[in-house]
Image (spheres, helix red, strand yellow):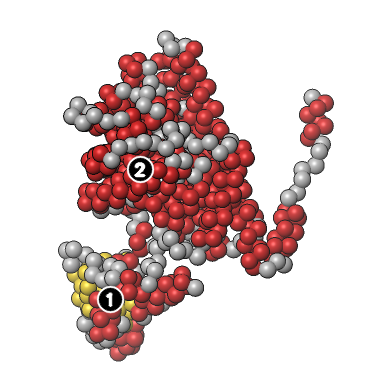
Amino acid sequence: MRLFLVISSIPAFDTAPVLKQIVKWLNSLAPNTRRIIQTCAFGISAGLVGVAFHYAIHWLFDFAMVHQADIHPEQFIWISLVVILVTSLISGYLLYQYCPEASGSGIPQLKMAYWKDFGVMPFRVVWVKFIAGVLTIGGGTSLGREGPSVQLGGAIASKVASLLGVAKQNRRTAAAAGAAAGLAAAFNAPLAAMTFVLEEVIEDLNSRNLGSVIFSSMIGAVLVYALIGQHPAFSLKEDLDAQWLVYLLIPLVSCASAASGILFQLLTLSIRARAKEIRWFPNWCKPAVGGLITWALGISVFIYTGHLGVFGLGYEDLSSALANNLPWTIAGLLFVTKLLATAFSYGSGGCGGIFAPTLFLGAMCSLFLVGLIEFFVPLRPDDRVLLAVVGMSCCMGAVVRAPVTSILIVFEMTHQFSLVPALMLGTLLSQFIARKMTAEGLYQALLHQDGHRIEHIIPPRDLQSWQNYPVAAIAKFKPVSAASLEPDHLRELINDYAYQRFPVIEDGQLSGILTREEIEHSLELNRPPRLGKAKTCQRHQSINEAQFGLIESEEGIVVILDEEDEPVGVLTLHDLVRAERQIASNQE
């Protein structure tokens, strides 16, 4: 009691004056110097959070799963059930009670925040994502830590930018830099982290944030080297001695791994869509469904084979596979069960990423296929390892649609430069297969499933490509329109809205265009208003085509029609100029 009174009597330290002095000092520096110091802060904060996330997941998984399976194999069935059920329920409650945007991998949410909200993310994303991610992945649910690390890094860097006085509209640099540092810390792969942020989040390898992304990625890697070490995630035999015959098999392995990745993507999206439609079941309980399915599949594999690869990251079994210590039949079993477990875990709303699972799936799919091939073609151990590594890159690349990242991440995780030519060939073929099978990657499809059209938010890189965008990218939907030509309705319309032009839509049909000036004259003279001729275009037509309609329109407005020719939006000269200005500001 006395100790409590002593502690409570200690005055709280007010950080506000210190922060004000730091902001004042930063503002006194040259812009380039200030930018470097800020990037250091983004990289260090995101890197430390990433390393802490890494440690927490591995500690929980080792204690709750690996250790229990070793010392209590008979009771592990029930111990693992309790662990995965409790952690899934707590994680689901945190996600849906406090921060729904922290569910899933977090990469689509980061991308939306980067483009739509200038990189601004609330701080609750950090603590909810951290706790829910540790419980979900460390508790055994079949998901990865890379997506959460990206979102955690971006969110904590966004908060640090706020504390350092960075204006809201300038926090995209912080979000991108933090995301790169977080991913570098998650995978000990700074090159892949840098390229992923540029390829997937910013979608521009020549972005003006390139320097900050590179610098913060390097900082994240240095922190990992200092706190964890420079060891690769997977140790392979140095200088793999694969025969040239193996290059003839790479196309077959690449196609199979890419197809397995697309199968995973389609299954995940289907499960997620059905889960969102279920209203009678509480949202916060849904991640537990994915956890229970993972447990059922994982414990079955454990009883039959003694392997834990279905649970969590699966890195132990993946390392065994790359060391030629995993039979091809068990690899096939792990592939099927891991695919189902991950699809249900992600589709039900679990908190975790898909990098680690897709790497796992690619390796197991390749090893199973290689086992079948060996009935007809003799292969060396090094051949099997090379094909497994190629499968990892191809499966992940097919799902994420970031080919450079998929090459670099496997290269950095193995520290094997000799793998690069095979990885390049495999990734090239996998991208071709993936783009033939589906129009978009998983992250883009997730955004579309949630009703977001990222192409409406990301400004194009040049005027020519912008003009080829669909007019729906810049049109204004649900416009204010005149539902009738009755004087009372028209008088109310111009009193409530300051617009100069109104489409007249009666019974769902477009009648024409009514200007404010014409409404005022008709009311003053007590006569029916005269309608102007409406220029129209379909929502899928290009902006370039819609521009001609604006030029020909006497009222300076084009009405957008849907597939059934019903009016759904309008395009004005103001919309056009605003969009062109956005391009110019993005290129400055």
Residue 354 as seen in the image, left or right of residue 380: right
Q: Position of residue 110 (x, y in %)?
A: 46, 51
Up-down: is 415 above or below 174? Answer: above
Q: Is 213 or 570 nearer to us in this picture?
A: 213
- Picture quadrant of residue 211: bottom right
Under mark 1, the amino acid is Asn
- Picture quadrant of residue 348: top left
- Are circles 1 and 2 on residues that touch, CB within 8 Å? no
Find the distance from the CA under tag 1 to the CA under tag 2.
39 Å
**What residue sits 63% from the left and 58% below the top?**
38
Up-down: is 450 above or below 278? Answer: below
Label placed on residue 544: 1
Under mark 2, the amino acid is Ser
Q: Is 301 or 584 nearer to us in this picture?
A: 301
The residue pinned by badge 2 equals 393
- Picture quadrant of residue 573: bottom left
Residue at disc 2, secondary structure: helix
Q: Position of residue 241 (x, y in %)?
A: 36, 36
Q: Nearer the viewer, mark 1 or mark 2?
A: 2
Screen quadrant of the N terminus: top right
Q: Residues within 10 Å of mark 1 (few under 14, many from 20)?
A: some
